[in-house]
Image: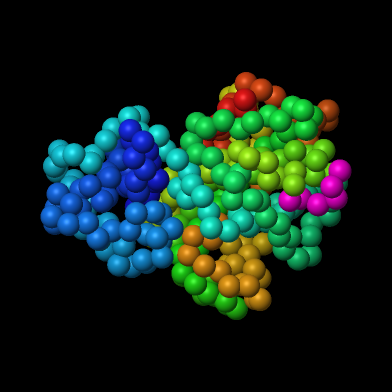
Amino acid sequence: MRFVTAKKEEKVFVGIVMGDSVLHLREVQKVMTGKVTLPITMIECIEAGDVFLKQAEEIVAWAQEKEMPGCYAIEDVHLMAPIPRPRKNIICVGKNYSDHAAEMGAAPPEHVIFFTKAPTTVVGQYEYVHSYSHLTEELDYEGELAIIIGKKGKSIAAADALSYVFGYTIVNDITARDVQSRHKQFFLGKSFDTFCPMGPVLVHQSALAGQDLHIETKVNGELRQSASTAEMLFSIPQIIATLSQGMTLEPGDIIATGTPAGVGKGFHPPRFLKAGDIIEVTVEGIGTLQNTVK
């Protein structure tokens, strides 16, 4: 199933993409059963686990051959980030592709590098990334596969890690490289508002395996990044196992798994973003996340 958080006439709802349409789950459930029991937000739906998934499957099966209120053409809704306001910082993995480490002048790391982005960075499909030209001259992109955690866990074994994944989405880890360098750490240069485009959909793990997916990034139609998630130095199970050793993971936690080579800073001379640039990050099985620099 391909879940979205969508907006229609100021109403925000959790939906499922069915072909070229988006099904408003709560509206259709009301027509179907006469009452609404589904949670309101994506995080609450994820927390409900198998109960939510079973209800969603029943609603989809019932609605497939019907035309009714609550089924909208996808172009008539705004696709927000699947989790528009995370409860916690987005967890990110640094230098998780050897070629990207090399283009940044670093050796492949021996251990997973973790950093975070503030929840206020998140924007959705077709929303603007602000250039902050008064604060940075080195605005950069990083296309990434992101994991959404589905259940609470700590000290998770790598062999069990995928059972804690609810699904996958796309993240563009926008970065002000000069701010990052100036402050000697990642957080500030990666946490300006709008610096985490996410979406357009959240694909349930039953429909997608994240271990070997093609990922690419284009800027103004020009291919900049192209790789497979199989090239990660640290796999998804390793990332989850390492992260959860001393920290509890919770439903709705977002983990961006790192970016391949081809970022703007990696070119000679560097090719940073500017106002008007269109960035498209595509991950096999998920779709394309598109945003414009403003």
Q: Magenta stretch: residue 183 in it?
A: yes
The residues colored magenta run: 182-187
Vertical relation: 170 (above or below) 115: above
Going 80% across and 40% down the picture, which residue do you hit?
A: 179
Image height check: is 256 above or below 201?
Answer: below
Work out which quarter of the rendered image holds the C terminus and state it. Answer: top right
Direction from residue 96 to residue 77 in the image, left or right: left
User: Does the image show residue 45?
Assistant: yes
Going 58% across and 62% down the picture, which residue do you hit? 236
Percent from the top left, x then y, of residue 13?
A: 34, 46
Judging depth in this view, the residue of 131 and 290 nearest the camera is 131
Residue sitting farthest toward the front: 10
Residue 232 within the segment the image draws in magenta: no
At which x and y percent is residue 124?
50, 39
Total marks shown come to 0
Horizontal arrangement in the rendering, residue 286 relative to residue 193 (left or right): left
Rendering quarter of residue 241: bottom right
Residue nearest the observer in this picture, 193 or 257 = 193
Where residue 79 appears, as percent x and y from the top left, is 42, 38
Say whether residue 241 is left or right of residue 208: right
Give the main secondary structure, helix, strand or loop, of the magenta stretch: loop
- Measured as percent of width and height from the top left, residue 175 is found at 71, 40
Q: Which residue is situated farthest in the top direction here?
A: 276
Q: Report the residue at 66% width, 33% height from top.
A: 224
* Quarter of image, res 154: bottom right
57 shown above or below 200: below
Left or right? Give the position of 179 relative to 207.
Answer: right
Q: Residue at x 48, y 53 (%)?
A: 168
Q: Is residue 143 visible?
A: no
